[in-house]
Image (cartoon, rainbow, N blue to C red):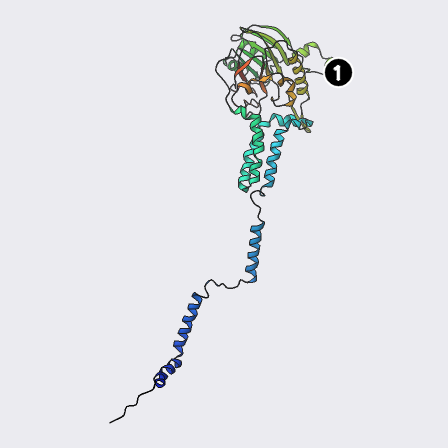
Amino acid sequence: MAQTETAGPAEAAGPTDREAAADPTDMEVAAGAADAVGAGQGGRGRRRAPGPGALDARIRRTLRIALRPGPWKRGLVLAASALLLGLLMLLHARITDLGGIGSLVETFLPWFGLFVPVLLAGALWRRSASAVVALVLPVAVWLNLFGGLLVDKSRPGGDLTLATHNVGADNPDPAGTARDLAASGADVLALEEITPQAKPVYEKELAEAYPHHTVRGTVGLWSRLPLSDTRPVDIQQDVGPLADTKPVTAVAADGRALRATVATDQGPLAVYVAHLGSVRVYSGGFTTGSRDRNARALGAAVAAEPNKRMVLLGDLNGTVDDRALDGVTSRLRSAQDAAGDGFGFTWPRTFPLARIDHVLVRGVTPVSAWVLPATGSDHRPVAAAISW
């Protein structure tokens, strides 16, 4: 029989191992697969180490974030400005009046509120919490000073209607101004800055509506009701040595204040008409000397008035917030503040910035107050209704 040779285990495996070892391609593929698996498992999340430039940029960015001021540290200049604004309005009476600065600030004090929205816009743009909180002070002070003027306090009715108007020395149409004022329905009408040329025009145009009138110097009073005890009021318009030599006729022609008694159904009413000196601008600032002197004299006359019921009509060339008028405003109250709607600005006519024309009262109750339409003057007329 023929014998068959059987290969041993070592021999059977031998050729396969040698073939695998002899095939370098398969070994490279396997190594690549192993590397891929390693990269997907053990090598996951590993990044190449950053270079020196990238590391420096990362450090700088981290420092910027860490050192960036927070909302309470941003806008410190805005916050300080808001606090100064609030203190300025709160302590306005303590501002020096050297050069008329204090008087000027108080004349335009309501307009300081316009800085609040400007500062608020800056605070929001800067995202400054400190500036927003600081704005609470000026807002609170402004509302305390003027918030009441934002409410309409007028009521219907009234026993007597009063009006006053600085008609303007340069008024190109005094006749038209007189007709407009007569149409206002005022029972008592005061005019200031009446020129000798315009006086007969006003007397003619107002004669039908107002049978009673008196003119002293540059101020006058027209009334539907009888007038008595009319006389000029000395507000020290002229002082010094030159004033002592001024003729009486000249003093009377330049008079700027008068007093009269109006006979009403409720009894006599003392009515004052006044036009105080103007505030003048010069190279060194503002001068208020004549206005302040007039205001002191007028305040003394008001204090000496025996009639408990009185009104003051006129152009005082100052607001009720102006310290120079304290002698007057401490004894009388503003009809606009008590019974008006809004600030009631009267000057200048085209774009009123301040209320320097007033109806001030004592012993009577203001019912309503308002600003009349503009005329040919540089002031706007004002009116008020009062009751007993």
Name which quarter of the figure residue 17 lies in: bottom left
Name the residue tied to disc 1: 241
Residue 58 in view: yes
276, 203: nearer the viewer: 276
75, 21: nearer the viewer: 21
Name which quarter of the figure residue 42 lies in: bottom left
Left or right placement of residue 4 versus residue 382 in this view: left
Q: Residue furthest right?
A: 241
Q: Is residue 304 above or below residue 150?
A: above
Spot occupied by residue 273 in the image (x, y as percentages of width and height): 60, 13
Name which quarter of the figure residue 216 lies in: top right
8, 59: nearer the viewer: 8
Spot occupied by residue 376 in the image (x, y as percentages of width and height): 54, 19
Q: Residue furthest bottom?
A: 1
Spot occupied by residue 198 in the image (x, y as percentages of width and height): 58, 13
The amino acid type, in three-letter code, at marker 1 is Pro
Q: Which image quarter is the C terminus in?
A: top right
Label 1 residue SS: helix
Q: Residue at x 63, y 23 (%)?
A: 322
Residue 376 in view: no
315, 253: nearer the viewer: 315
Disc 1 crowd rating (10 Å Cα; few below 14, some 14-19, many 20+) is few
Q: Residue at x 60, y 33 (%)?
A: 85
Q: Which image quarter is the N terminus in?
A: bottom left
Badge count? 1
Spot occupied by residue 352 in the image (x, y as percentages of width and height): 55, 24
